[in-house]
Amino acid sequence: MRMFASFCWIVIAASPVWAGNWANWRGPHCNGVADGTGYPTEWSDSRNLAWKVELPGRGSSTPIVWDDHIFLTCGIDGKNTILDYDLNGKERWRQTIGTERPGKHKKASGANSSCVTDGRYVYTYFKSGDLASFDFTGKILWTVNLQEKFGADTLWWDLGTSPVLTKNHCVVAVMQTGESYLVAFDKVTGNVAWKVDRNLNAPKEAAQSYSTPVVVTENGQEVLIVLGADHVTAHRADNGAEIWRVGGLNPTHHEFFRSIASPAFLDGIVIAPYGRGDTVTAIKIGGQGDVTATNVVWQKKGDGSDVPTPAAANGKVYILSDKGLLTCMEIASGKKLWSGQTEKHRLGFSSSPVLADGKIYITREDGKTFVLAQGDEFKIVAENELDGSQTLASPVFVNGRILLRSDTHLYCVGGK
């Protein structure tokens, strides 16, 4: 019996550990880290592909997953659309909300923002300003157009921020030239719970941000961390009031330092990429008012990212540049542990890195995914190509499978 018990433990320990939900575009911990083990490292169009479905419209939002539901957005026949697929790739329902406002940039669309869910409701946001809540059957519970209610979109390019959820609210950050603000809606009713201005006098395009806030816990309360307009600010989740701010991200007042990458958070430290990849700043949370002089832990020039959002785990932060330079740093000190360059290519990286089962997954804009070891050196262990379609969404990891979303298709890798 003792031998049998030991054998069972060996089998269990070596078996994959499944993990179910991916409720927002950065995963279960909001930092680009997947739960579970046993994720595939090698695949192609003809190998280790569980299924592939053609999408009915264009979009670049990262899918989210809750139980047997995969939610993503796109534009269909001039309408903003949310789609619900099951884990076998079968469409369950689709619902439209508002008129699509197409993207300006060749890489963008009117459906760049990712959905978010609390397991009961799912929330969507589109370039048109339409924000909506749905139940899991596709019923629209409430909808509001932020641009009609609070003023026109003045972004030079295409909406990129995604809504985030706190305990009671669905929160959207609108950071643009002119009036900028954070607004929270009651998750159940859609009523405005609070709205606070966020006008920080950044010059021209530097006032514009496409990043998504991060919800963290500070001194036992929910706090929203927001990056954009040359600052990182922290706000109370219950009423939006600013707690602290850090400036100095744009000391030369560069007019075109718009912000795309979102902040990452780990071990009480916010990682803020800025300046089109020029700098990375580490900020200790806490304090009151302007804490620029006291809370900046370190700042590095170079090795930054413009579009991809860093991933952070186990005391380390992984920063991917748009051109495929991946850098691993100690989050507490900023010490560079290693860095390396993927193959040179005319296309870059817009999706964000994901850490899963001891590996780092990074996906290029043509859908090629590089798998690297989370070791003490830059080491590529696999390179995987699909059909070459434009891929801006980040990979999603659930139940031993990887979901990859391109402009044209949704792929499910692995799953045996």
Image: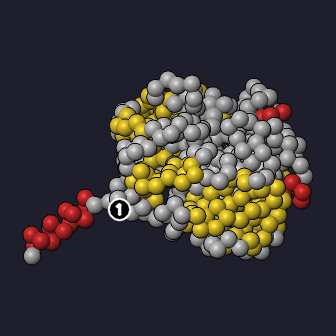
State the residue at coordinates (67%, 48%). Answer: 59
Q: Nearer the viewer, residue 193 or 384?
A: 384
The spot of residue 103 in percent (x, y) is 76, 42
Q: Could you say which is closer to the camera, residue 234 or residue 372?
A: 372
Q: Quadrant of residue 407?
A: top right
For image coordinates 48% across by 63% down, the residue present is 88
Residue at (84%, 33%) from the top-left corner? 204
**Residue holding disc 1:** 17
- Between 129 and 196, the one lying in front of the other is 129
* Point 57% across, 59% down: residue: 64
Of the 4 image quadrants, the one containing the N terminus is bottom left
In the image: residue 114, left or right of residue 364 = right
Among the 4 quarters of the image, the one containing residue 3: bottom left
Local crowd size for mark 1, using a 10 Å CA cut-off: few (<14), some (14–19), many (≥20): some
The kind of residue tagged 1 is Val
Asked whether residue 122 appears in the rendered view, the answer is yes
Quadrant occupied by the C terminus: bottom left
Check the image and report above or below for 291 versus 342.
below
**Foreground residue, 66 or 293?**
66
Camera sees residue 284: no
Estimate the x, y position of residue 188 in percent, counting from the top left: 73, 74
- Label 1: state its secondary structure: loop
Residue 375, position in %: x, y?
Answer: 35, 39
31 sits left or right of 145 in the view: left
